[in-house]
Image (cartoon, helix red, strand yellow):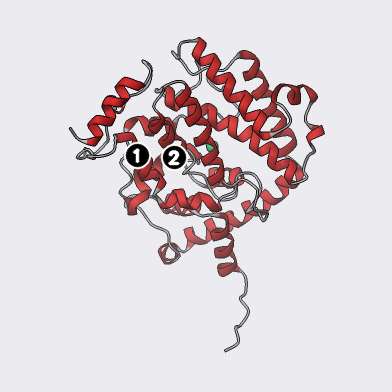
Amino acid sequence: MTIRRSIEKTENDLLGMTACRSQQSRGRERQEEPCRIRTVFQVDRDRILHSKSFRRLKYKTQVFLAPEGDHYRTRLTHTLEVSQIARTIARALRLNEDLTEAIALGHDLGHTPFGHAGERVLAELLPNGFHHVSQSLRVVDVLEKGGSGLNLSWEVRDGISNHSKGRGPLLNNESAALPTTLEGQLVRLADIIAYVSHDLDDAIRAGLINNSDVPEQLRGQFGEKHSQRINRMVSDVIETSLSASVSQVAVSHNMETGIKTLREWLYANVYQADAVEAEFRKAKRILRELFRYFVDNPGELIICGGRHQPGDAIEVAVGDFLAGMTDRFALNLYQHLFLPQPWKNC
Ligand code: MG
């Protein structure tokens, strides 16, 4: 028996009835010889972790632009926090932790530089619009590995493509497009659990708000500190799901209302705050000018590190290039292309 087979057997013994077992995977778009050591979901997790898009998350904005302070979240640390929260819940509910981790690590790979400002400007510029979710899928299906993609399993792709809720329902709503597996559904919840807490934490760190500005009712429900907030939300999801025999990933009505109220409060007081929007306006201008430059000078796209997938319109190729940039790459490129450079002494 291979090591993979023995891990698959252990999954059968340890995982709950409603978990997604590696052996049940619907497989990959292009068939491959299975790994002797790792299950299909372990392989996917490793492919994502070792990808260039994953490393670039390090220098992409979460909320605060190209953060100068070392303690602000970036898209990478957000992703790692989502992964930790999701794995804790998965293990408690005896769901598949490897599948959970793969979806969590891959869910935000399609995010642009400059956070949602980048997403909004690309949505305006591209003929077919832009959304980070479909871009995450495009990254893993097409753009990674020099244009051949990571060829991930159906379940990981499904989790990535249905993780986002925007300002919509968290889980318990039939109109929401939910991931098929419970592991995918819990990453969707872990994403919002992570960001409502850490964005609040960062906004206080930035001096944008004080802890006392947060409505008293929310502070009472979630606690005053990041660790308390995470602990209360995670405990609620675990207990509510267990009381439903893990037939679904669930959150109590009271907690769901609290999370939605906190999210709306963050929109009004942090995400759409004047100080944040002012920086976003500058970021949008940079991306708009870079977009126009490369559409007008397609030859420069390749020289500067972009790629033109066969059959794609130039706008799509430029959109891929811009979406893949880190904040600092976009800023440096803008400076290089549009600002005069001082002569260097010999
Ligand atoms: Mg996310």
Q: Residue at x 61, y 57 (%)?
A: 286
Task: Let me know if residue 239 appears in the view.
Answer: yes
Numbered label tally: 2
Question: Which residue appears farthest toward the right when viewing the image?
Answer: 212
Residue 335 picture quarter = bottom right
Front-most of 331 and 123? 331
Contact (Cβ within 8 Å) of mark 2 with mark 1: yes
Would residue 259 appear left or right of 293 to someone viewing this image?
right
- Could you say which is closer to the camera, residue 20 or residue 180? 20
Label 2's element?
A: helix
Q: Which mark is residue 106?
A: 2
Q: Front-most of 198 and 273?
A: 198
Task: Left or right? Give the position of 245 relative to 229.
Answer: left
Report the disc number at residue 44: 1
Task: Tell me which amino acid carries mark 1.
Answer: Asp
Going by the numbered disc 2, the residue's amino acid type is Gly
Which residue is farthest bottom? 346
Question: Which quarter of the rendered picture does the N terminus lie within?
Answer: top left
Residue 74 screen position, x and y as percent: 58, 47
Mark 1 crowdedness (10 Å alpha carbons): few <14, some 14-19, many ≥20:
many
Image position, residue 75 (x, y; %): 55, 45
Residue 73, picture quadrant:
top right
Q: Is residue 138 above or below residue 295?
A: above
Report the disc number at residue 15: none
Q: Residues within 10 Å of mark 2 (few under 14, many from 20)?
A: many
Residue shown at 66% from the left, 47% from the top: 64
From this view, report whether residue 37 is shown above or below residue 171: below
Residue at point 56% right, 41% down? 78
Q: Calculate the distance from the C-alpha at mark 2 to the C-alpha at mark 1.
A: 9 Å
